[in-house]
Image (tube, rainbow, N blue to C red):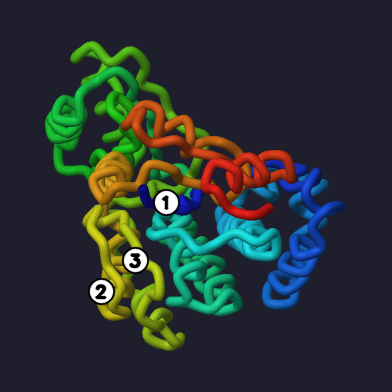
Amino acid sequence: MKSAFIFPGQGSQSVGMLDTAVDSWPIVAKTFSEASDVLGYDLWHLCQHGPAEDLNQTTVTQPALLTASIALWRQWFVAGGQAPDYVAGHSLGEYSALVAAESLNFSDAIKLVQLRGELMQSAVPAGEGKMAAILGLEDEDVIAACAEAANGDVVAAVNFNAPGQVVIAGSAAAVDRAIEACKSRGARKAMPLPVSVPSHCALMKGASEELATALDNVDFNDAVIPVVQNVTASVAQDSDTLKANLVKQLYSPVLWTDTVRKLVASDVRIAVECGPGKVLAGLAKRIDRDLSVYGIDEPDALNKAAEALGQKA
């Protein structure tokens, strides 16, 4: 039996995250202090006190979630935990996975995800892009609805999160048309998401070119732990492949369902959600019930995860 650490992306943040962990785990405050030094503002204070609308700005959310995840990753080893057999991260979470796999160093990753957020935010003028969650349709039906609704605009299925749970993104008008097309196909729910950035679609192509330049200017190493990447849902370790897929990830779908299935096919039976919240655990239940997922965002949860893995805590 093998294990994996999985790192969440945007949507797992909340004001007050890790508030029960910081008193018990000094490494949490230390990690946030490191990130604050890089960013030039007090990231921990913002995460604890908000306001939520500031924390939910993509240029803040991305470094905040990366920092929270790496704080928990470090605490796992402080508590006597061992490295997993695989790592993977959902969208933004792939950067956390690459820090964990020693492909990127933490400070470079903080700078990259802050830039990534800025590039994504500026790629499409406010109000012109949109995302929506589609529940209760097969993937093929969502893809067909997007093709039907495009009419020369960009709209595509971009997050294959779990069976019957797909997110679409593109130009606002096309997403609205696709929502109606999904409803006509019998979607249980088809609802806009409260985001302004249409992630993982062709509208991000220009941003990806600038990100590629930034990635070329940081040290990028082969991963010491195999990484299952979003774009291919396959295992990679060499730095060139990892970096190329990070660039593609910005304008390509997140194949999370296939990523989890790849982990299970690789004999992973226990995964640790290394970040705040339980979003990935919820998706895993819908994807494959053979995979047990444990959180480690507070002391009792970490102890349970260590016990499940037969490791010290």
The answer to whether marks 1 and 2 mark residues whose Cβ atoms lie closer than 8 Å is no
The residue at which mark 3 appears reads as: 226
Task: Say whether residue 293 is left or right of residue 42.
Answer: left
Q: CA distance from mark 3 to mark 2?
A: 12 Å
Task: Say whether residue 1 is left or right of residue 57.
Answer: left
**Which numbered disc, 3 or 1, marks the residue that appears first in the sequence?**
1
| Of the pair 228 and 10, the residue shown nearer to us | 228
The residue at which mark 2 appears reads as: 241
Q: Is residue 158 among the parts visible in the rendering?
A: no
Give the x, y percent position of residue 80. 65, 61
Pair 1/2: label in front: 1
At mark 1, the secondary structure is strand
Q: CA distance from mark 3 to mark 1?
A: 12 Å
At mark 3, the secondary structure is loop
At mark 2, the secondary structure is helix
Kindly identify the amino acid type of the residue bearing the numbered disc 2: Thr
The residue at which mark 1 appears reads as: 3
What residue sits 28% from the left and 15% below the top? 187
What residue sits 64% from the left and 54% below the top? 312
Q: Up-down: is 195 above or below 78? A: above
Residue 141, image quadrant: top left
Give the x, y percent position of residue 15. 74, 42
Specify few, some or many for label 2: CA neighbours under 10 Å numbering under 14, 14-19, or 20 or more: few
Kindly identify the amino acid type of the residue bearing the numbered disc 1: Ser
Q: Is residue 257 among the parts visible in the rendering?
A: yes
